């Protein structure tokens, strides 16, 4: 039987991966974070180790002891932990001190290299989940207007620019005005912040990075995103085709049509 270590962050992504991996006959050992990971992972993985976000040494020890040669990183570890009063072990302090900056890709890249130094291959985080990557086209029955298509094209250029700088991957626009861009707060807060300035009708664009490493930090949308769009009275969500994980797709598209929200993959 094939085996894999699942380094599980927050949200549904790690749960979906564990389910899909088990269906494919893969033995899943999860490393879960007390501050982030959904407790349901215990029922879905064959074996689960719980650690704190600050325990890099413990994570390394688990990987070494399990002697499994493939690992995957699924789900987000919120960037704000950098500023939170949590205890960091000496190994994590050393890793962070060596970094040129604390951007997401910089941190995740260093962690990936640390894991691969153990002789473990870090695989594409969409493994077993390719069906969740939408192809190009309008996904809802609701179609964007010509003006909204112009905002999508405008927002796409801005989003790709901030993604290239590893600032964030989401931008919210209306009438070719940038209302908010994503930084440390995440997509949902970015959308909410934009809603302070307009009474609905904004266009949300979420993209991958120009050199997206599919091993980690893959863009993701789902039911939670939709609820934020509804509360913020957004008009359009545009995601990058074949580079964005779309969770709860059937429910989200049906609900989006009900609320006249257009969803497109560009």
Image: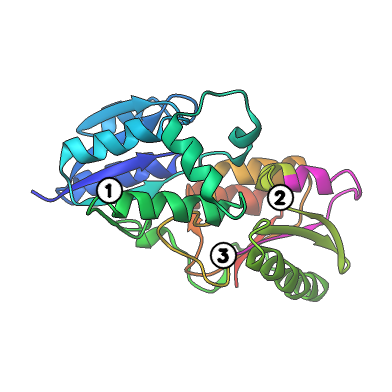
Q: Residues within 10 Å of mark 1 (few under 14, many from 20)?
A: some
Pair 1/3: label in front: 3
- Name which of mark 1 and mark 3 comes first in the sequence: 1
Residue highlighted by disc 1: 20
Residue highlighted by disc 3: 208
From the viewer's perspective, tell me whether residue 3 is left or right of residue 171: left
From the viewer's perspective, tell me whether residue 83 is left or right of residue 4: right
Measuring from the top left, give residue 25's x and y in whole percent: 14, 48
Q: Residues within 10 Å of mark 3 (few under 14, many from 20)?
A: many
Measuring from the top left, give residue 176's x and y in whole percent: 86, 69
Whether residue 14 is situated above or below residue 99 in the rendered picture:
above
- Name which of mark 1 and mark 2 comes first in the sequence: 1
- Name which residue lies at 35% across and 33% down: 57
Q: In the rendered image, is residue 71 in sight?
A: yes
Measuring from the top left, give residue 149's x and y in whole percent: 75, 74
Q: Residues within 10 Å of mark 2 (few under 14, many from 20)?
A: some
Secondary structure, mark 2, is loop
- Name which residue lies at 55% across and 44% down: 97
Q: How many marks?
A: 3
Q: Tell me, what colour scheme is on the image?
A: rainbow
- Name which residue lies at 42% across and 49% down: 111
Measuring from the top left, give residue 263's x and y in whole percent: 63, 61
The span picked out in magenta is 190-208
Q: Pick whichever, 255 or 163, lies toward us.
A: 163
Q: Is residue 236 magenta?
A: no
Secondary structure, mark 1, is helix
Quarter of the image with the C terminus is bottom right
Asked whether the beta carbons under mark 1 and mark 2 sit within 8 Å of each other, the answer is: no
- Name which of mark 3 and mark 2 comes first in the sequence: 2
Residue highlighted by disc 2: 183
In the rendered structure, find residue 252 and report the number of the disc placed on it: none
């Amino acid at each position: 039987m094939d085996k894999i270590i699942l380094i599980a962050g927050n949200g549904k992504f790690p749960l979906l991966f564990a389910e899909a991996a088990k269906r494919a006959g893969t033995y899943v050992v999860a490393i879960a974070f007390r501050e982030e990971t959904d407790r349901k992972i215990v029922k879905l993985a064959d074996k689960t180790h719980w650690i704190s976000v600050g325990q890099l040494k413990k994570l390394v020890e688990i990987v070494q002891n399990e002697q499994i040669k493939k690992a995957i990183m699924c789900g987000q570890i919120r960037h704000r932990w950098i500023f939170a009063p949590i205890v960091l072990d000496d190994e994590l302090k050393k890793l962070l001190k060596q970094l040129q900056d604390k951007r997401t890709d910089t941190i995740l890249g260093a962690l990936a290299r640390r894991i691969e130094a153990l002789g473990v291959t870090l695989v594409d985080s969409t493994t077993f989940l390719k069906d969740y990557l939408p192809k190009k086209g309008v996904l809802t029955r609701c179609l964007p207007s010509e003006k909204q298509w112009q905002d999508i094209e405008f927002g796409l250029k801005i989003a790709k620019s901030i993604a290239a700088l590893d600032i964030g991957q989401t931008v919210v626009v209306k009438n070719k005005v940038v209302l908010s861009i994503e930084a440390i707060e995440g997509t949902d807060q970015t959308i909410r912040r934009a809603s302070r300035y307009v009474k609905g009708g904004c266009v949300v664009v979420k993209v991958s990075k120009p050199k997206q490493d599919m091993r980690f930090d893959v863009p993701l949308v789902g039911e939670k995103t939709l609820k934020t769009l509804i509360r913020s009275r957004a008009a359009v969500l545009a995601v990058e085709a074949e580079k964005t994980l779309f969770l709860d797709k059937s429910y989200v598209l049906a609900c989006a049509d009900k609320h006249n929200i257009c969803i497109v993959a560009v």
